[in-house]
Amino acid sequence: MGGLRVCLIASSRFPIREPFAGGLEAHTSTLATELQRRGHHVSVFAAPGSHLGCPVEILDVPPFRASRAARADVAAPPEVWMQEHHAYLTLMMRLMGSGRQEFDVVLNNSLHHLPVAMAPVVPVPMVTILHTPPVPWLESAIEIAGAGSTFVTVSAAMGRAWAHATTTRTILNGVDPDRWSEGPGGLDAVWSGRIAPEKAPHEAIDAARASGRAIVLAGPIMDEDYFETEIRHRLGADARYAGHLGQRDLCQLVGSSQVALVTPTWDEPFGLVAAEAMSCGTPVAGYARGGLVEVVTADSGRLAAAHDIGALAGAIDDAARLDRRAVRAHATAAHGLARMVDEYETLFASLLLEPAA
């Protein structure tokens, strides 16, 4: 399709740069880079300090500093809440006024409620990707905005979760097989992601030990108290923390591991770390929750009941016997970048063909 002018709304809190704060930031970078490579002009609204590694326009996130009088209000919301509100409100006001002159489509890849709530007053089509199970602020925005945005969920599980609030279509996330290249495998297990209670890396350590394997953890420590109480005392000769790695180093670590563990304590919307591992040829052992049931198949891994350490240890053993080339082939076909962006381009084209309201 011809080059489109795409406004991509990302997080105003975490910069889009390596090492990424999480899967949402990695997804934003991958999507923007591939759209730009295909000839679209991409403008990204993202936190200060963002650097995507491709020639996209970064839209400024204006700072907000409350006055002394406002700070004196005992009911004032937290400063970070006001900063995010101010940033998204400024962007949406801009899109209201000049959106038609600047853009052909808006792709909302944030978790903030304002782009959803204000979508009806933006004079170009907006696509909102729902990366989470239902949360009150997004439900409220959807109720206000009605059909102002076209909603995409990243798994059928999330589509079912949102069915009470809005109609959605599913576009599974994708990873770049050239960046997440095939690795040789190894003897150890690996766990990657945000180190926080809802990701439960402590259960991954316990399961790896139960299977007789060492494990390496990698990712940003998002909850220091959790790390100190649940992770640090579990570290040792057979369990180490490698730090917050950039994509290249993380790919090398994952690709040289025997099995990747994914242990969410919530209904994971998709499970990008699973798709990344499988793209490296590394099979996945994880919990059967949320979108992981769609991402991990019999060809690419094994799933166990959540919080069942013994069952997860057995899943590790079973996954380790899978053929790495078959794992990679499944990931490339089902979760490749080209497939994902093809589907977004098809969606954009269908929206632009619809008659103006």
Image: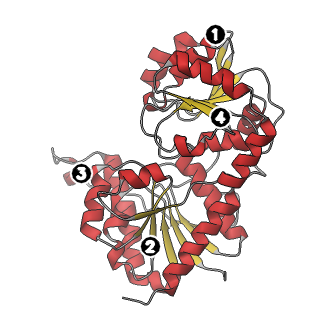
- Which sits in the foreground, 68 or 146? 146
Alpha carbons under labels 1 and 2: distance apart = 49 Å
Residue identifier under label 3: 68
Disc 2 on helix, strand or loop?
Answer: strand
- Calculate the distance from the C-alpha at mark 4 to the C-alpha at mark 3: 56 Å
The residue carrying mark 4 is 301
Find the distance from the CA under tag 1 to the CA under tag 3: 50 Å
Q: Residue at x 34, y 61 (%)?
A: 86
* Foreground: disc 1 or disc 3: 1
> Which badge, 4 or 1, comes first in the chain's sequence?
1
Quarter of the C terminus within the rendering: bottom left
| Callout 3 touching callout 2 (CB < 8 Å) | no
Which callout, 1 or 2, points at the residue further toward the start of the chain? 2
For residue 192, which quarter of the picture? top right
* Kind of residue at badge 3: Arg
Other-residue count near label 3 (Cα within 10 Å), few / some / many at <14 / 14–19 / ≥20: few
Kind of residue at disc 2? Met
Seen at 37% across and 79% down, the residue is 96
Which residue is denoted by mark 2 in the rendering? Answer: 126
Mark 3 or 2: in front is 2
Residue 215, quarter of picture: top right
Residue for badge 1: 236
Residue 173 figure quarter:
bottom right
Q: Nearer the viewer, residue 80 or 183?
A: 183
